[in-house]
Image (cartoon, helix red, strand yellow):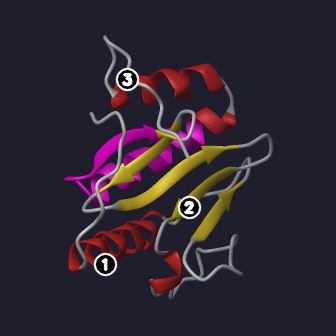
């Protein structure tokens, strides 16, 4: 896995803004909404770009990513298998031992209170264990 090289004039946040604008469809709007929820729920999160431009939000380690595909925007929680999900948000990557994901499709609504709670739990889990250093573009 490689990190996106540093761009001399743009922060990761600016590059994520550009990525959202380039999508220019429902996926960009969905990613922007997800991003707003993440940053509201985890105000100390650092925005990064990894793995060829995937937005990543970290707070003492990776909290979640925002990947865009043709038919979905996938929000993957790095330690999702260790999180309680009382409202059943996780609907993808359920077979793994570590990660869990939420696939959002065109027209889907976001249960913002439940998603904020899940993000806060992911941050709390990360803060309970020190993270390994990673290479990235930080905001």
Image position of 30 with respect to 63: above or below: above
Whole-angstrom CA distance, mark 3 to mark 2, is 23 Å
Magenta segment: does it hold 133? Answer: no
Pointer 1: what residue? 125
- Circle 2: is it few (<14), some (14-19), or many (20+) Cα within 10 Å? many
Range of residues picked out in magenta: 29-49
Secondary structure mostly seen in the magenta stretch? helix
Instruction: Label 3: state its secondary structure.
Output: loop
Residue positioned 34% across, 77% down in the render? 121
Please say if the residues under marks 1 and 2 sit with CB atoms less than 8 Å apart: no
Q: Residue 16 carries which label?
A: none
Q: Earlier in the sequence, mark 3 or mark 1?
A: 3
Give the quadrant of residue 10: top left
Q: Please count the marks in the image.
A: 3
Q: Residue furthest right?
A: 71
Q: In this view, does 82 lie to the left or right of 132?
A: right
Q: Earlier in the sequence, mark 1 or mark 2?
A: 2
Q: Which residue lies furthest to the top in this view?
A: 9
Residue positioned 47% across, 37% down in the render? 3
Q: Position of residue 38 (x, y in %)?
A: 37, 54
Pointer 3: what residue? 6
- Residue 20 is at least partly visible in this image: yes
């Amino acid at each position: 896995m490689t990190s996106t090289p540093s761009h001399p004039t743009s922060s990761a946040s600016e590059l994520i803004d550009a990525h959202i604008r380039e999508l220019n469809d429902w996926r960009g709007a969905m990613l922007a909404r997800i991003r707003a929820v993440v940053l509201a729920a985890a105000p100390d999160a650092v925005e990064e770009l990894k793995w060829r431009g995937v937005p990543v939000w970290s707070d003492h380690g990776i909290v979640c990513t925002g990947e865009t595909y043709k038919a979905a925007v996938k929000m993957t929680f790095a330690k999702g298998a260790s999180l309680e999900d009382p409202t059943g948000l996780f609907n993808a990557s359920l077979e793994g031992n570590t990660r869990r994901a939420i696939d959002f499709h065109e027209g889907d609504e976001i249960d913002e209170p439940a998603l904020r709670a899940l993000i806060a739990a992911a941050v709390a889990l990360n803060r309970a264990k020190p993270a390994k250093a990673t290479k990235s573009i930080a905001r």
